[in-house]
Image: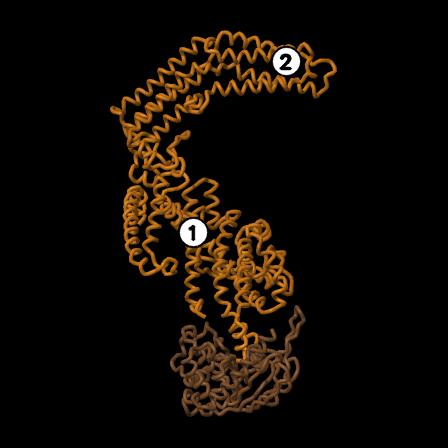
Chain colours: A orange, B brown
Amino acid sequence: MSDFFHWLSVNRATIAAFLIILLLITFVFSIVIGRRLSAIRDKDEVFGDPERTKGGWYWAVCGVSALLLIWFYFSWGSARAYFPKSANELCQVAKLHDAVSPINAALPSGSRYFKSTTLVARNSEQLRALRAGFPVAAFSAAEGTEVESLFDELHGLIGIYSDPDKQDPESNSKLASLVDEINGLSGRLRDGHSGYEPAPEAASQSAWGLTHIEIPLLPETARGALFDKVANDAQGVAKNFLKARNAPPAAVDAIADIRARIDVLAAGAAPEGADEAALKDRNNFIKSLDRIFKRLDDGTIFPAAALDGVDDAMAGLQQATQSAKGFGLRFVESGFMPGGSIIKSRTQCTEQGSGRWLPKPTDVVAKFGLLANPDLEAGGGFKGTPLFWWKWLPIADVVGFFTPDWIADVIPGEFGRHGPDGNFEPNLKDRVLAFAQGDVPMGHVPMFAGHIWDSLFRVLVALALGILLGVPLGIFMGVSRFFKSFFDPLIELYRPVPPLAWAPLILTIFGIQDDGKIFLLFMVAFAIMVISARTGASGTQLSKIRASHSLGASTGQILRNVILPNAMPEILTGIRIAIGVCWGTLVAAEMLAGTTGVGFVENVARTVSDYELIWVTILIMGLLGLMFDLFMRWVIDKSIPWRGKG
Amino acid sequence: MANLTSDNLCMTFTNPQTGAAVEALKDVNFTLKKGEILSVLGPSGCGKTTLLNIIAGFINPTSGKIALGDNEITGPGVERGMVFQQGALFEWLPVSKNVDFGLRMKKTPKKEAAAQVEKWLDTVGLQGFGDTPTYQLSGGMQQRVALARCLVNDPDVILMDEPLGALDALTREKMQSLVLDLWKETGKTIMIITHSVEEALLLGERLFVMAPRPGRLHKEYRLPFAEMGLTQSLRDVKKDPYFSEVREEILTMIWNMEEEIMGRV
């Protein structure tokens, strides 16, 4: 059995490929059938006839298959099914992008502006701002004049860097050789991938999306190997680019001069009578000036014209990359990987865009299978709890939960003490306390267990309590002026508060485990049940009440035999609404706090960005909610068949 | 079983907002002997339903007294059965459970109740319908269930509030025969409120015409048609010249009352 699941898991891409074809066929056929049947039916029914909405399973099939196809497409499931190697090839391309990204970041072709332009603009602006905020009181008049001329010289330094005529020849030739190196890379890409071999270790990599290393890193094709090699060399080119410095002789002189002058300024003393604040201003000003200067003295600003060659070469590399990808890879990338591409982060390649946050259908199923495995030892379940299974529940736990400890206190006598011989003999009072605390073993009963069950259990218990207490109160409110007026303010005041607004308070008072959540849900269910039972009870036809009076029924008999059954449709509708609202509230409450439940699973999945798990929990919640609703619809149809016929 | 006696019965409704008082009934006096069948006619707003509700015990008169035998009526009771226009059946129960409702309230033993239900379903012509849900029955059948439900309690008086008003003409005629048959078979005192003059004539051994503002007994007739209906077909009864004569007289009377109301408003 587990072999079979393993086989399914390993071959998920192939299975997806079959499924997609199947879905396409289903999609087309359902449309054909639907159109054919509509053509017949539309003749019999005029527009607006409610009969026109009945049946139509083929459109349901069409809708579901369309949805699944869209899911396969946007999750890149179709890309993985039909082009399993493409992700690996694109990963190699991403390596090249990653390698040259420092060069691109400094050029207009990659980031709109030259990095030099940005530096010039920023440093000039900061110099201007610093000059405008010169603290006059902290410097002597002579120092003031000195600072003014310093600012002029700093502006001049920026000018020297930016002047192509003053550029030092050494950096110029360095940039020229960089252009050659980049062009060399482009040339290799243009020459094509013949002669390249995939890495021998690549064969042992697992396929795309099978392990938590999403996309295999080593090149598996000749084209991939080409990109891999080029990317490797590009790293060196990028390093050289980052090392390139502009050091015009005029700038070198200016730097030495400015350095000395700032040092003199820093060594000088504040004028007589300067207070503490002025002293602080003086220090801060000199520090800021020094900081800007240090950004200027490293020679990272080049004249714009000097970098044009590199920019052109990088544009050429970009073109060469596109052509080396070949039509097939470009087609797969733009046509089958909507909303993003494959990027390389520090150590691995990942999908980006919808491929990242929308897991593939087959992966979601595989993840669900993993979670649904009740064998925790084999990696099933989640955080030590299975998804939906059973366990042996000690009866004593249940008894202890429902028996209050104070029943031991009210028994006459004293709790036992340890004797002088060091022994403790429990008396009756002690035994009752142990019973009430659930310490007396009473055997076990089989019970459901797991995240789904925990969520279900909370909803069902809260719902049961809400029905047991809410329906009688609602019925009384429907027939009694006192009950209606006395309880109306209470219920109408707490009901409109969104349940989650109560959650922090309730969870603090009752704890984050079942008690708190059940109480929170009980509050939700109670209000809904009261209101629906009240509506049902007060809607009883007067003639029915009068008839039962005439037939000799007492007040209690009328309540039980006439008003309650008459309110049944409203009560059942109320239950249906209450289940839905409780379910929604519960999941949110579990996200706030707790250690089990479907909402808890999703909350953990959120913190670790496990998109597959998030989608699995979303699907579980949706399916369970749908199940509840279908069940209630069935119950309503079965138990009140007279609805709409009375 | 006893006579139904109304003694200076008055009923005034006061609008709680405006304080305006409406005299729904004023000084209504009559005695309905045991076993008589009475129909009550009158234009809308003449207080016929109010009178029925007082007799049923659903509302209490402002002044005056109404008694069944020696017992003054102060509330609803099993000795006064009630049949409503729409049947007022309990749609969540099948026919048999509707019929034995009164018996179940009295905690009658199941066997005895079942026998009673069978007997009365037989009488009203619904043999074998015991397990049918009431919402699947036609209007006429629903009224038959309502009749059986009322009769199973063995009331002294049966009060009917336009019981056949919602039925089609043919069903209505059948039901009228059924009412007459039941009257003869059971010997119950029956009071029927109706809008139809023909029905009032056919079913009423006695007939009250009521007048509005204030609601009062306008004229009383003693008629032979109910007795005739027991032996002849109702259609033959309607062909009787006296029948047409009385019908025209009452129609004119009610017509004039309605005109008077319109004129006054």
Residue at the spot 42% in from the left edge and 89% down from the top edge: B239
Spatial CA span between label 2 and label 1: 69 Å
Q: Is residue A316 above or below residue A571?
A: above
Q: Position of residue B228 (x, y in %)?
A: 45, 92
x%, y% of residue B141? Answer: 42, 78
Name the element at disc 1: helix
- Taking depth in this image into account, of A198 and B217 the one nearest to the observer is B217
Q: Chain of mark 2?
A: A
Left or right of A256? Residue A92 is: left
The disc placed on residue A266 is: 2
Q: Nearer the viewer, mark 2 or mark 1?
A: 1
User: Mark 2 is on which residue type?
Assistant: Ala
Instruction: Check disc 1 and give the amino acid type.
Output: Gly
Residue A67 vs residue A449, the one in the foreground = A67
How many other residues sit within 10 Å of disc 2, few (<14), some (14-19) or many (≥20)? some
Q: Residue at x 39, y 50 (%)?
A: A372
Q: Earlier in the sequence, mark 2 or mark 1?
A: 2
Front-most of residues A521 and A489: A489
Check disc 1: other Cα within 10 Å, few if <14, some if 14-19, many if 20+: few
Residue A463, compared with residue B243, is above or below; it is above
Kindly state the secondary structure of the residue where label 2 is placed.
helix
Residue at numbered disc 1: A622
Residue drawn at point x = 46 percent, y = 11 percent:
A164
What x and y, as percent, mark residue B119? 43, 86
Residue A645, above or below B173: above
